[in-house]
Image: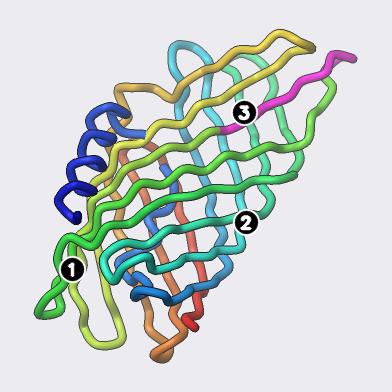
Amino acid sequence: MRKTLLFFFMICFVALAGYGAPCYGPKMPQSGQWFIGGQTHIIFDRDLESNWGSLRSTQHFLLLSYGVFDWLSIDLKGGGGNIKQHPVDSDELDYPSSFDGGYGLRLKLYDQDDLGIVFGFQHISVHPSSIRVEGVKNQAILDDWQVSLLVSYSFNKIVPYLGVKASRVDYIHWVDEQRKRRMSDLTESIGGFIGCDLLLSDRVWINLEGQFFDGQAACASINFAF
């Protein structure tokens, strides 16, 4: 069963060519266990393809993870987020915060002698409020896709980790009824990340993570197991 799921995720990895959302870190719920938490994720800069400029986004989430098995978790999130898109030769388009959400899976590949390896898939979709520019309605959606592979090592109360990821951010833009999808720069689809879990108790921990190369982003969360 585990080999079948691993094969499926690897196929997804190749097919997506990558697609950056937070990786959640190495701590996963055991079978039948729930994690809840609150997270802030900030994309400081992500370049778009061709001459479409760049974008930024601030996202806040309520997190919910469930352990299907000890080695497989389902991760869900919902909250609010904005988009700030900067074309090359014009003013930034600032879409106010509204609904965002996401989902993902994590697969524990190895967990022994304080060393852990986790494969993950994550997706975030941000749906901010529309704006008017010179009387014309503008609407946008940010779709953020990612697969990742991380390695962690536990030092008692601190669990640092690092990894590689392939990611893609799509900027979907409507001007009145005309819709266009612009992808992030494909030459910057492979990135890295580094983070740590700070264990405050057996059931409470803080996760911190920074992402680089494919874009500049960071996140922080506080989490509870029950």
Residue 214 is situated, as x and y percent measured from the top left of the image, at 34, 36
The disc placed on residue 116 is 1
Q: How far apart are marks 3 and 2 (CA)?
A: 18 Å
Separation of disc 1 and disc 2 at Cα?
A: 28 Å
Which residue does the image show at 21% across and 39% down from the upper left? 10
- Furthest toward the top, the residue is 178
67, 49: nearer the viewer: 67
CB atoms of marks 1 and 2 within 8 Å: no
Judge whether residue 138 is colored magenta: yes
| Category of crowding for the residue at label 2, using alpha-carbon neighbours closer than 10 angstroms: few (below 14), some (14–19), many (at least 20) | many
Q: Where is residue 205 in the image (x, y as percent from the top left)?
A: 44, 80
Question: Element under label 2?
Answer: strand
Give the side of residue 35 with respect to residue 175, left or right: left
Which residue in the protein does label 3 denote? 85
The image position of residue 226, as x and y in percent, is 49, 83
Q: Residues within 10 Å of mark 3 (few under 14, many from 20)?
A: many
Q: Quadrant of the N terminus?
A: bottom left
Mark 1 or 2, nearer chain start: 2
Give the x, y percent position of residue 84.
64, 34
Amino acid type, callout 1: Gly
Predominant secondary structure in magenta? Answer: strand
Mark 2 sits on what residue?
60
Residue 25 among magenta residues: no
